Amino acid sequence: MSISRRKFLGWMGAAGLAGTIGTKAQAASNKEFTGYPDSVAVLHDITRCVGCRKCEAACNTVNELPGPDRPFDDLTVLNEKRRTTAKTYTVVNQFGGEKPVFAKIQCNHCLEPACASACFVKAFTKTPEGAVVYNAKICVGCRYCMIACPFEIPTYEYDEPFTPRVMKCTMCHPRVVNGQLPGCVESCPTEALIFGKRSELLKVARQRIADYPERYVDHIYGEEEMGGTHWLYLSDTAFSEVGLREDLGTIPAGALTKGALGAVPMVVGLWPVLLTGIYAINKRKEKIATAEQQAAVTHAIAETTADAEAKLAAAMEKAGKEKEAAIEREVKKALDEAAKAAAEAAKNDQDAGGSAETSEDA
Amino acid sequence: MSEQAATDRSTLVTPFNVIAGIIVIIGLVLTAIRFTKGLGATTNLSDYNPWGIWIGFDLLVGVALAAGGYVTSAAVYIFGMKKYHAAVRPAILTGFLGYALVVFALHYDVGQPWRLPYPFLVSQGTTSLLFEVGACVALYLTVLFIEFSPAAMEWLGLKRARSIVVKLTMLLTIFGVILSTLHQSSLGALFLIAPSKLHPLWYSPYIPIYFFVTSTIAGLSMVIFESTLSHHYFHNKMDDAHKEGHNDLALGFGKAAAWVLAGYFIIKVIGVAADDNWHYLATGYGAWFLFEMLGFVALPAFLYAVGARDKNTKLIRWTAAWTVLGIVVNRLNVSMVAFNYHLPSSERYFPHWMEIAISVFIVTVGILVFRFIVTRMPILYEHPDYESH
């Protein structure tokens, strides 16, 4: 595995750029969305609801939903707690014992909807009119919207094998843009549901609380919950006792995930630097280690060579000296022997006469 | 040749193959039911519980346990721990198969699987954490495929193509770590949007970090676990580098896992403290949380450390299996046990037997493909004709 540093950095630059294109996280933004002006909403005054289920019937009709399991004039269904289903966009539940309270649930049409924030194909749209509408044509069916919705409203057509859809209240958006009222509002006999601009309805709600402080809980549910909703509630009973959670907080759903989304481009930008750095440091360490090893080996070889040469030289010198000494010794020995021989010859001459000595000298 | 075919046929009928065959047949039947009768006929999913084990196990656990690919390739190529080189290919293969099966499993779970490319091709929901998960998983699956491809090319004898791909190793490794950081954490971040539904002991603003850190623990443990199994069942396919590196790998990765588990324990305690959730520890959910933290985090951290100190590879191998189980427990806790904790038990989810059977089927398919590949391609040994990269 070997690549040039230049090539490598080029690749990393390309990877970083590719990773940032097409993401639109607004993590560090200070922009705040306070809702579309003149958007419409519904105010549900729980104190006025009598549990007649006329809204349920109207919803079923105008949305052309499948017929109910039990007829809409059968009020015994109120004895059990119900939720929205793939066949019902809205249900009325009964709470309390002696003096029952009735509350209607449906999509609350958040200002900043969790479902729309969670959807990975943008199948949900917050319309300028106020409704949150769903586009079944692009929905993949991951059901993350149902995980995300704090009000547990979206439902799924689990029994539809080929084209299942997410089903939820549309605030009768097609009717509203035609100037008509939502089906449920139109059918309500007690004005427990009223329709209007959200800003106006908030004023109406405040006025009612101000006019009848002993009757109402001093809170408009939906004004701030999850960043605000387009379905507002007034109640004489604690909201948590009529099926509306009071522990949801006021932070819109999108704000819960923006930190994590905002970290994405940071990771894409910095990880290549960090990882390349670690790689480079290790590479360099390796290089230095190799170089040091090389140097040590070279040094060792040089030292050994020098040592050996010195030893050789010493040995040579010694050998030379020994040789000289040997030669000297041999020469001396030869001389001695010659002298000895001469001396012996002289002795023989003396024995045999002077002529031999004369011939040897010659 | 005919002799060899005869032995092949006789070795085909083994207890494992018979059981795997039965599971695959059941899986195919259930697949037909799922795609003709719909989710309602095969699952216990409901409007309150839109995600079951096909997300909790197949997606969340599947992706976490497939983290061995990025952990090992980063250790070897970026951190320069070359002595674990022999572990890279099996880890990449496990990762690649893991991600491929995750994508395969998603086709069962989503309502209209033929629309799975829609987030990229038709309408980009960039505000969704699921978009990030989808984008990163799709890209990373591609990266893993390319990282794995040299083994297949050596098997097929595509020398030139291999030499080109091998040059990309470093780039792919870095790309893999980036993508893994992003989607491993994003799987946890999916739950950030639902603080009202996930029990406070499991919900935390730090949940993306928890998921990322546990993915490295899962990766380290899974590599040890997988190498133990491979060593047992595919010993004859291994070269000396694999056989000799086997214990070194367990000791090194076990030691790393001990440290990461210890760090994870600390940041989990910080999470409980940051949200002041101490009082929940005295509840039933608290007991289960403590069991997870002490039994599946503190205990394996300790056992890994002891194993590394004493060079006790047997202890490390058992701890790896236990830690893998701990990852499964953690992901199921977040996605199912602690999710919808506020609902009455009648509204809670328990998987339909067909959901479990499909998950078992998918895991079985993974094991069969793994076996097919390691018995044919140079995964557990180096191909003699090629220089390692």
Image (cartoon, coloured by chain):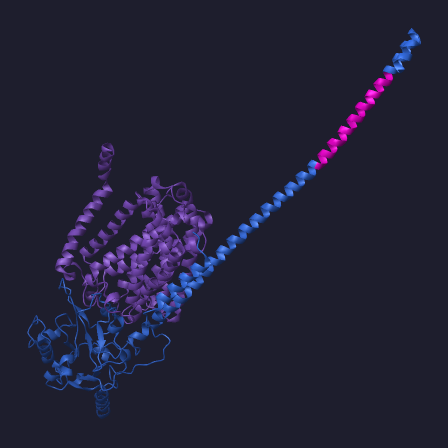
Chain colours: A blue, B purple
> A83 left or right of B91?
left
**Residue B155 found in image quarter:** top left
Which residue appears farthest toward the front when viewing the image? A362
Q: Residue at x 34, y 39 (%)?
A: B236
Task: Please tell me whether the stretch drawn in magenta is mainly helix, strand or loop.
Answer: helix
In the displayed structure, A105 sits above or below A200; it is above
Residue B252 appearing in the image: yes
In the displayed structure, A219 sits above or below B328; it is below
Q: Which percent across, then down, holds residue B191?
A: 30, 67
Any magenta on residue B29? no
Q: Which region is colored magenta?
A: A313-340
> B266 left or right of A204?
right
**Residue A80 found in image quarter:** bottom left
Q: Which percent across, then down, holds residue A240?
A: 23, 77
> A57 left or right of B186?
left
Q: Which percent across, then down, holds residue A361?
A: 89, 15
